[in-house]
Image: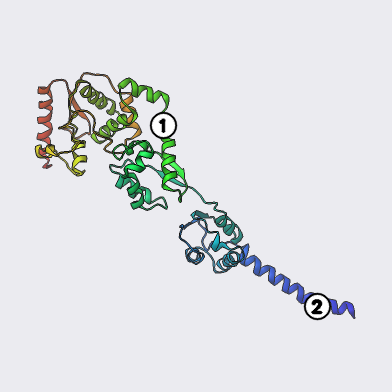
Amino acid sequence: MKKYTAKYYLIPATICLAGIVAIGYNYFFSAFASQDNKQYIYIDEDDTADSVYAKLEPLASHSALTGFRTLARHYDYDGHIRSGRYAIEPGMNTVSVFRMMRNGRQEPVMLTIPECRTMEQMAARLSKKLMLDSTSIAQALTDEDFCEQLGYDTCTIASIFVPNTYEVYWNTSMDKLMQRMMSEHDKFWTEERKQKARELGLSTDEVCTLASIIDEETANNAEKPMIAGMYLNRLKIGMPLQADPTVKFALKDFALKRIYHNHLEVNSPYNTYKNTGLPPGPIKVASIQGIDAVLNRVAHTYIYMCAKEDFSGTHNFATSYQEHLNNAARYAKALNERGIK
């Protein structure tokens, strides 16, 4: 009779236990994501538990989200929310997702530093990959005190950026981002590169400034060392650089196809028709190819340059002014024939 009674209670108890295990597995150990592809959730500094649930809802199954809420209440997630970019892999269970987010185990982003012309453009591009908004980035990069802390000013701050792709965390602060950029800058400027700059009589910032002008003159990397040699010849003899891209930068009109005499009258330290020497800083974030073109410039005697009339993106070089005028006349004729104003 006792054996019968024990069996009578054991069967429903086993069924109940199995049900509890099944429910627990469904809520906590089954696949969290409702889709089969890798997904990301971005947690901001001002997020609350409720806003995190709202962000998770489109990604998670109903039972997994219920399990997440249960864990969040039990482990006081609302008081331990950590910002970041979190990857939810297919097959991850609720417990794994919760532990990842509560412990701040975020996945880094691949941040590409673009060759922007202005720091406002840089801010807009960086904000698309980082938690930082474009306004706060732009304000920092155009703030004299902030730039001075890094050893730059608002004119030379573009020199700190080396266009490349870096692994960073989405929620990195502005200070940490710029410290990382400084670290990458120092790695790039090896002793060999710095020695070549010294031999040219230029600082690393001045190399970046000249490189930025050359980058704007041509996209042809093979020709950049020739152009670098020409501008260095002008600097050596005290001749104005007379670089059209600096006028566009001074006018903040980068769509200009032709530079006319009235454009050359703009009163700006970036107008290299009016001022000798280099402008106060780069007119864009210089490319690595542009920087190395300056450091490895071709030694020659040319002091004039004009775009070729075939619109190949390359240039005709000249040592005499008359030869240069002839080259310029051919180019102007080609522009007129194409109706380029």
Q: Quadrant of residue 156?
A: top left
Look at mark 2 in the image and give the residue it sits on: 9
Q: Nearer the viewer, residue 273 or 17?
A: 273
Q: Earlier in the sequence, mark 1 or mark 2?
A: 2
Query: What's under tag 2, amino acid-wise?
Result: Tyr
Q: Position of residue 57 (x, y in %)?
A: 49, 66
On screen, residue 19 versus residue 48, left or right, reads: right
167 is higher (above) or lower (below) than 196: below
Secondary structure at badge 2 equals: helix
Query: What's under tag 1, amino acid-wise?
Result: Phe
87 is higher (above) or lower (below) than 177: below
On screen, residue 183 versus residue 210, left or right, reads: right
The answer to whether the residues at label 1 and label 2 have Cβ atoms under 8 Å apart is no
Secondary structure at badge 1 equals: helix
Look at mark 1 in the image and give the residue it sits on: 188
On screen, residue 41 versus residue 91, left or right, reads: left
- Which residue extends farthest right? 1
